[in-house]
């Protein structure tokens, strides 16, 4: 960002990378305590990175999402009222380069990577690992998980049951 560009709020210069990367806090986003936003990560809306959280790399936060405690987000989209906390790890899958999405009122406290969407009131508990190294999306909410075999088919197209999730 150009010098003097207005953005979100930092408690100290240590909360936002001062290097030559594209890390930035937009709108009313906040990075405070010992949190660090760096490596091209972007915070939008009223998002918060706090405590010892690290938000870096191919990571974007929107809405009222929060990364806190010792969470590490190095790749993913965290949005709406989602919470990434505890010792959570959210990252890009190294084989597919696909990042997970955490949205709604979901909570991630475990490890998450790859083609996964945690939505509604979905949760990943401490000690749980969900790593999807395929291009098929796994959707997780409070009721369970489903695999979508072909995310490119729009509803009502293709064969009769092609885009119905497996349970």
Image (cartoon, helix red, strand yellow):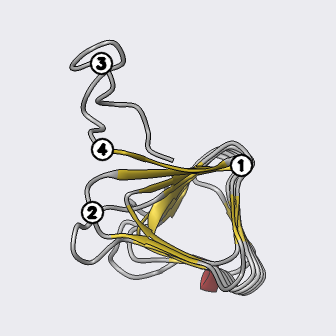
The mark tally for this picture is 4
Q: Residues within 10 Å of mark 3 (few under 14, many from 20)?
A: few
**Label 4: which secondary element:** loop
Residue picked out by circle 2: 134
Disc 2 and disc 1: Cα gap in Å?
32 Å
The residue drawn where x is 34% and y is 73% is 21
Q: Residue 149 carries which label?
A: 4
Residue 27: percent from left, percent from top:
63, 46
**Lower sequence index among marks 2 and 3:** 2
The mark lying in front, picked from 4 and 2, is 4
The front one of 94 and 148 is 148
The front one of 100 and 67 is 100
**26 left or right of 68?**
left
Residue 106: percent from left, percent from top:
71, 54
Q: Are marks 4 and 1 in contact (CB under 8 Å)?
A: no
Residue 161: percent from left, percent from top:
33, 25
**Label 1: which secondary element:** loop
**Label 3: which secondary element:** loop
Q: In this view, does 42 lie above or below 39?
A: above
Disc 4 and disc 2: Cα gap in Å?
10 Å
The residue drawn where x is 69% and y is 42% is 120
Disc 3 and disc 4: Cα gap in Å?
13 Å
**Label 2: which secondary element:** loop
Q: Residue 160 carries which label?
A: 3
Q: Are marks 2 and 3 in contact (CB under 8 Å)?
A: no
């Amino acid at each position: 960002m150009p010098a003097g560009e207005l953005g979100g709020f930092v408690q100290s210069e240590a909360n936002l990378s001062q290097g030559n990367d594209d890390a930035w806090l937009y709108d009313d986003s906040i990075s405070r305590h010992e949190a660090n936003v760096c490596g091209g990560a972007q915070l939008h809306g009223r998002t918060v990175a706090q405590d010892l959280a690290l938000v870096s790399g191919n990571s974007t936060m929107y809405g009222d999402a929060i990364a806190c405690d010792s969470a590490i987000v190095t790749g993913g989209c965290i949005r709406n009222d989602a919470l990434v906390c505890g010792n959570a790890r959210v990252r890009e899958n190294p084989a597919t380069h696909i990042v997970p999405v955490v949205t709604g009122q979901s909570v991630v406290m475990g490890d998450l990577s790859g083609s996964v969407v945690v939505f509604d009131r979905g949760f990943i508990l401490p000690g749980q690992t969900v790593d999807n190294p395929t291009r098929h999306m796994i959707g997780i909410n409070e009721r369970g998980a489903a695999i979508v075999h072909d995310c490119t088919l729009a509803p009502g197209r293709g064969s009769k049951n092609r885009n119905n999730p497996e349970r």
